[in-house]
Image: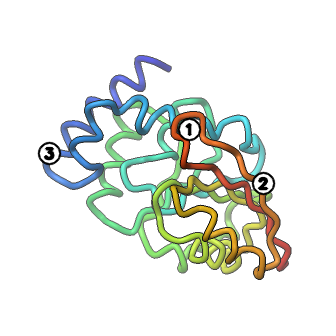
Amino acid sequence: MTELLEKYIELLKQWNKYINLVQANSLKDVKKRHIDDCLQLTPYLPKEGTIFDIGSGAGFPGVILAIAGFNNLVLIEKDIKKAVFLKEVKRNLNLNYEIYNGDVYHLNTKKYKKPFFAISRAFGSLQILIDIMKKLSIPNGLFHRGKNWQFEITQLEMRNCNYEIIKSQLTHDSVILKIQCYYF
C-alpha cells in the first residue's frame, strides 16, 4: 500500500500544478492532511454493495480507499479535468473503481449492487448530501464534517435520519458523521 500511496502523491503533486485539485499548502503534509483523514473511514465501510464517493475531486476519499483494498467504489465527479485525473490515477496505479463524470443527480444507480452507501469529504452541506442520498435511494452515509458540524446536525433531526458522531482522530474540531435515513 505504501508504494501505491507514494505514486498517488507524486501524481497529485504533478497534476495540482495544472488543475486545482487541492490547496497547494496542503501538499506539504499530504499524508496526514488528506490520506490519514480518509483512512479513518475504513472500519465503518461495508465490504458488500456499492460505495458512492460524492464529489470525489482529487480522489479523497475514493482513491485512498481503493488503494486500501476497497473494490466496490464509484467515484462521482462533475468536473471533467478532475475526472480525467481520476482516470489517470486508476490507469497508473492499476486500481479498481468506476468513475462517473457527470451530475450526481443524473446517476442511474440501477446497474450497481445494493446495499448502497455514500461517502464524501468536501462536497457541500449535509443537507445537500442528504438530498442526494434520498434522490439516489442511498440509506447510509459517512461524511467528514468540519467545525460547523453541530449546526448541520440540527438539519438532520427534521429529515428522518439517525446519526452517530465519530470523533476525528486527526483534528479536534472535526467529526465523521455516520448517517442512516429512513425515507425509503
- Of the numbered discs 2 and 3, the one sitting upstream in the chain is 3
Q: Classify residue 179 as left or right of residue 86.
A: right
Of the residues shown, which amino acid type is indicated by label 2? Glu
Secondary structure at numbered mark 3: loop
Q: Looking at the image, how many numbered discs can be counted on the residues?
A: 3
At x 64%, y 50%, the residue is: 176
- Position above or below: 13 against 84: above
The residue where tag 2 is placed is: 164
Residue 19 locus on image (x, y percent): 19, 54
Of the residues shown, which amino acid type is indicated by label 3? Lys
Kindly report the distance in space between the C-alpha atoms of the residues bearing marks 3 and 1: 24 Å
Mark 2 closeness class: few <14, some 14–19, many ≥20 residues within 10 Å: few
The residue where tag 3 is placed is: 17
At x 57%, y 76%, the residue is: 128
Of the residues shown, which amino acid type is indicated by label 1? Leu
Pair 2/1: label in front: 2
Q: Classify residue 16 as left or right of residue 169.
A: left
- Position above or below: 20 against 45: below
Secondary structure at numbered mark 2: strand
At x 49%, y 37%, the residue is: 64
Kindly report the distance in space between the C-alpha atoms of the residues bearing marks 2 and 1: 21 Å
Residue 10 locus on image (x, y percent): 26, 29
Q: Classify residue 68 as left or right of residue 164.
A: left
The residue where tag 1 is placed is: 65
At x 51%, y 57%, the residue is: 147
